[in-house]
Image (cartoon, coloured by chain):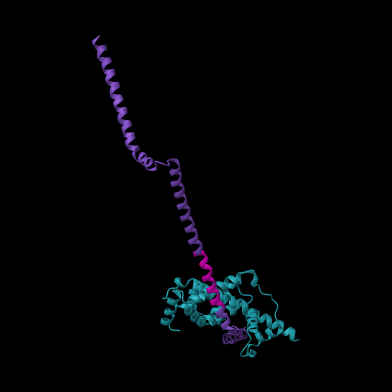
């Protein structure tokens, strides 16, 4: 057993002395640098793709906006600005209709009051 | 390489400097090849591992903290790659032993000063072929690369006790292998 221990230690020390080296170290270094450069060049299309995507989305939005404008112009060819004024004055109009409604309500109430007075007199 | 020079090179690499990285590759390539070859016992696989290691070093250079040893960090990357390869089914040993390799193992005093890589690979493969991947990694780092147990713990993530028990088992398995070879070789000589 002791001799096996001795042999193993001797074997290990012999293997320590033997340092494996690559046949062509320069080629190996060049290969590594080449792989790194290839990785860098592979990353460029991703950047290019993202730029293209953003540009496409922006162009689509602009086109949609342009089409919307065109459709408004087609609907109101002469009075585009008038349409805009009408759209803008919509809240005022709604307020006016509310006032009208309120006045009608008061008028109806006064009629009802008149009727009630005449009934009470009778 | 001085730690200060190394830090300058690492900072340059972080700024995408390929020339600085070449200097790092040239400095550490031999060390990585030696460990990979001693673990995998195959020149082509060792070269692939060297390439994989440096690609990982390049892509993860931002993660390296300068308060730890750079060589330890590189050894960790290499060890993990080799461990994965050793665990894969491709790395099962053939089991066949050449008589001339057996003779060298039984009589280590006859081992030449300069072995060619293929012979060295066969000797290590025959001796350590029956070890588990973890035992093999620990044996190679400690006995062949002469790294202390504390650093092996950092590289492998194992505790010191676990490393020691793996080394004990590795030695036991290798001694049994040598004894078996001696018996077989005696029969062969007769």
In the figure, the shade used to draw chain B is cyan
Visible residue check, residue A82: yes
Q: Position of residue B152 (x, y in %)?
A: 50, 76
Range of magenta residues: A31-47
B106 in the magenta segment: no
Visible residue check, residue B35: no
Q: Position of residue A35 (x, y in %)?
A: 55, 74
| Above or below, comparing residue A18 to residue B132 in the picture | below
Q: Position of residue A32 (x, y in %)?
A: 55, 77
Residue closest to the eye, B30 or B88 = B30
In the figure, the shade used to draw chain A is purple
Q: Is residue A59 left or right of residue A1?
A: left
The quadrant in which residue B169 appears is bottom right
The quadrant in which residue A107 appears is top left
Query: Which secondary structure type mostly characterizes the magenta part of the structure?
Result: helix
Q: Is residue B103 left or right of residue B48?
A: right
Which residue is pictured at 64% across the width and 79% down the height?
B125
Q: Quadrant of the N terminus of chain B?
A: bottom left
Which residue is pictured at 49% across the width and 81% down the height?
B23
Farthest residue in the left direction? A121
């Amino acid at each position: 057993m002791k001799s096996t221990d001795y042999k193993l230690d001797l074997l290990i020390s012999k293997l320590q002395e033997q340092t494996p080296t690559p046949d062509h170290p320069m080629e190996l270094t060049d290969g590594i640098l080449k792989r790194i450069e290839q990785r860098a060049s592979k990353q460029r299309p991703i950047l290019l793709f993202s730029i293209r995507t953003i540009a496409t989305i922006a162009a689509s939005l602009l086109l949609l906006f342009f089409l919307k404008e065109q459709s408004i112009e087609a609907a109101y060819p002469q009075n585009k600005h008038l349409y805009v004024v009408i759209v803008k004055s919509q809240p005022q109009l709604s307020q006016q209709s509310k006032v009208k409604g309120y006045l009608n309500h008061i008028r109806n109430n006064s009629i009802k009051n008149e009727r009630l007075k005449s009934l009470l007199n009778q | 390489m001085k730690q200060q020079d190394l830090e300058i090179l690492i900072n340059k690499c972080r700024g995408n400097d390929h020339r600085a990285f070449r200097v790092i590759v040239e400095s550490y390539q031999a060390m990585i090849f030696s460990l990979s070859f001693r673990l995998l016992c195959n020149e082509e696989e060792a070269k692939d591992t060297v390439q994989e290691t440096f690609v990982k070093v390049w892509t993860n250079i931002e993660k390296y903290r300068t308060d730890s040893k750079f060589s330890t960090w590189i050894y960790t990357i290499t060890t993990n790659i080799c461990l994965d390869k050793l665990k894969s089914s491709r790395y099962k040993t053939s089991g066949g032993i050449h008589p001339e390799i057996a003779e060298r193992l039984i009589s280590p005093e006859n081992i030449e000063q300069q072995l060619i890589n293929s012979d060295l690979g066969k000797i290590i493969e025959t001796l350590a072929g029956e070890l588990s991947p973890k035992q093999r990694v620990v044996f190679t780092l400690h006995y062949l690369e002469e790294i202390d147990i504390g650093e092996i713990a950092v590289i492998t993530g194992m505790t010191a006790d676990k490393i020691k028990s793996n080394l004990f088992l590795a030695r036991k398995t290798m001694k049994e292998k040598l004894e078996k070879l001696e018996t077989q070789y005696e029969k062969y000589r007769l």
